[in-house]
Image (tube, rainbow, N blue to C red):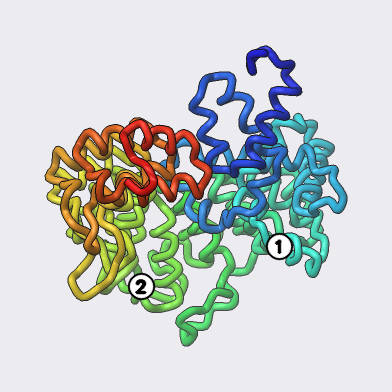
Amino acid sequence: MHLFNFPEEIFSKILLHASLARGVKRALRLRLVCKLFSQALPPALFESRLLDSFKTDEILSDWAIENDHGATKLWHSYLVYRVHNEIRQPCQRRYLDLRLVAQRVCEETGADIETTIEALCWPALKQCTLPYINSKLEKEPLSPNLDLLCAAAYLNHISVAQRLLREGYSPHTETHLFLSPMELAAWAGNAQILQMFQENVPELEGLDPARVLDTAWRGKVGPASIRGAATRGDIEVVRLAIYPPSRAAPESTDFVDQVFGSFDRRSSTGIKLSIAQSATRDVEVYKYLEGFLSGPRNLSSNLTKHARLGNLEMVRYLLDAGADIRGDSGRLGPLAEACRRCHEDVVDLLLDRGADPHFNGDENIMNGDSAMHVVAASGSLAMVHKLIARGGDLFSMDMGIEMGCHALYSAVLLENTEMVKYLVAAGVDLKIYGETVLRAASLEGLDSMVEVLRGEGVSFGS
């Protein structure tokens, strides 16, 4: 019987057990088989709960400003699935609480529950997918009204937010589900709610200029709302977060404790503005926040970050502003980071500006892989062609081994048949490296790759 002729529920169970047997990365590759697999695989993968073990604080660290080619949508879909289906015992509180706050929003506003859950899973995305969060939550009190205030701030439910403010709930307080209402209102671009919050809090509280890493300062202005506005990339909301109309001296251009344009980047406020600056991919917002700061700029590290995130216009701006195209002393340079994430437009720009496909750090610093080393592991044959056309060499040596061998090994682990055949045709010496790669494929249970390598004449003992 043909696989596609099975009833839908049986086909789904087959994909579920394939995911459990082969793991997340190999299961996701099944989406490339055909449209039916692409549609049926995510629910089966979600049912497996395999995604629970991923360190999403790393995967989703900058998701809100990243050009991620759909990865964030997958994680958002998984969170929505868990909120709808968390019925196992013991239930995980984060999903139950998220469903509860969505239900309360709907009770107070008449909104649709499906739409509300999908919307609230965005601001809850990073926190609610952390694998270790459950044990942490057992020690924290329930905060249903604060959760509701956060939801109202994000969804622009003004009357709900007004009531909770009158009841004494602070728009500065984070919960186990959400960032603070101040940050969420700014991030969502809800200017009316943000101004209402500003009017209901003190001018300034908690700032100690002597504490360089002071994180407690807040008030009508504060790091959270500025960061939220910067993440959104809306210059008008950023200005509102920095200069609230309700402040004591609305005509002043001073900010918190310093004069505009003179903020030491190492001061408490300077550090927080720099963090907000690094949280935007909007060039206008980045330049506006730069106007507050003085002292050396961290252009090169920001270049590497935005190359990794795939933010073309930010990469262009930072290069024009004088960033070193090699990046800083981090593990990967901008070109390697862009190659690893398959940001082709960023790769093109960096190559046009003279980036070296073989650069892997200064001579005295062990930084890691060059772009040429990384590119095969990206799984993109187009990227390999691109680097070779710009001077990349598969037969250069890296740590005593031909680059092509590294590329072949990575392609085999990715089960990328097209890449493997291309590398063999390009001249990677299977007599030297073939048996080692074949053995790795066999140990990993990559039957399709074992078959391909044997078809190219590789065998154990050859």
Q: Quadrant of residue 10?
A: top right
Q: Is 418 drawn above or below residue 377 in the view shown?
A: above
Q: Which residue is mark 1?
A: 170
Taking the spot 71% from the left edge, 16% from the top edge, the residue there is 6
Q: Nearer the viewer, residue 224 or 297?
A: 297
Is residue 282 visible from the viewing direction of this image? no
Name the amino acid type tagged 2. Answer: Val
Dot 2, how many residues are within 10 Å of its Cα: few (below 14), some (14-19), or many (20+)? Answer: few
Classify 10 Å Cα crowding around label 1: few (below 14), some (14-19), many (20 and above): some
Q: Quadrant of residue 8?
A: top right
Cβ–Cβ under 8 Å for marks 2 and 1 = no
Q: Secondary structure at mark 2?
A: loop
Between 302 and 153, the residue placed more toward the observer is 302
Dividing the picture into quadrants, the one containing residue 255 is bottom left
> Can you tell which mark lies on residue 290?
none
- Which x, y percent locates residue 288? 33, 56
Closer-to-camera residue (411/332): 411
Mark 2 or 1, which is nearer the eye? Answer: 1
Q: Amino acid at mark 1?
A: Ser
> Residue 110 placed where, x, y %?
80, 31
